[in-house]
Image (cartoon, rainbow, N blue to C red):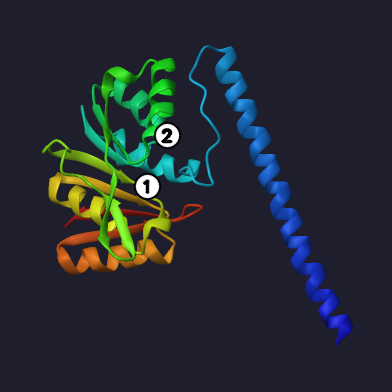
Amino acid sequence: MRRLLRKIRNRLFAGLARKEELNQLYNQFAGLIQIQNAMQGSSVLRPMRGWAISPDAMAWILADLQERESPTVIEFGSGQSTIILATVLKQRGGRLVSVEHDSGYLGAIQRQAKACNVTDVITFALAPLVAMSPTCSSYDLTSLPDCSIDLALIDGPPFTNGLLTRLVPLRWATTHLIKGGAIFLDDAARGNEQECLRQLRAEFPGINIIEYAAEKGLAKLEFI
């Protein structure tokens, strides 16, 4: 029995060690790319993954976005996605609405956007969190512009605000989406996001959901 437990322990910790090595390799490679960007005069991004959207998920979104002419995009949860989307939209004649609940973090992204020269295509919207129930809060979206959108990225609020915290931005995006538009939900592999998708599908039976392979899961929503 001891020998078996020792084998299990060795395999477990060996796996953790390999994961840590892979994470370190990714961090070093990503850092090198940002150094090269800085030396070439391009925008420098802060680290992605973790709380931020992962590069593989963002690649799916950008592949969809490149097929749209002068698109209007909204993101719920400002961050490095703000800089990436705004840079692409500036090239394509589009606009970005970036929604964030944390005023301090929003200010940091605004400064980064200014440094990257993309503020002219971004409308920043501060949306404080309000209680939906005793155990869940989400964005107060009453001040958002009543506009049609081509694409939405839902990457907030943080899951710590309750099981259905992202259902509010999902509903908003669904009711403002143009025909042929798309909504992307980050972190779609988590139980909270899966529950939001189940409830949204019940409320909007005509919606089609496609799940992509990404580090934390990514779901694309569109009307059939």
Q: Residue at label 1?
A: 155
Q: Can you tell which quarter of the image residue 181 is in?
A: top left
- Residue displayed at 20% across by 27% down: 70
Q: Residue at label 2?
A: 105
Residue 167 lies left or right of residue 55; in this view the side is: left
Instruction: Say what amino acid the circle numbered 1 marks.
Output: Asp
Element under label 1?
A: loop
Instruction: Say what amino acid the circle numbered 2 marks.
Output: Tyr
Q: Can you tell which quarter of the image residue 100 is in?
A: top left
Q: Position of residue 209 (x, y in %)?
A: 28, 60
Residue 11 lies left or right of residue 43; in this view the side is: right
Residue that extends furthest to the right in the rendered view of this protein: 3
Depth check: give the residue in front, 103 or 71: 103
Residue that extends furthest to the bottom in the rendered view of this protein: 1
How many numbered circles are shown?
2
Depth check: give the residue in front, 147 or 140: 140
Depth check: give the residue in front, 137 or 5: 137
Quadrant (top left, top right, bottom left, bottom right) of the C terminus: bottom left
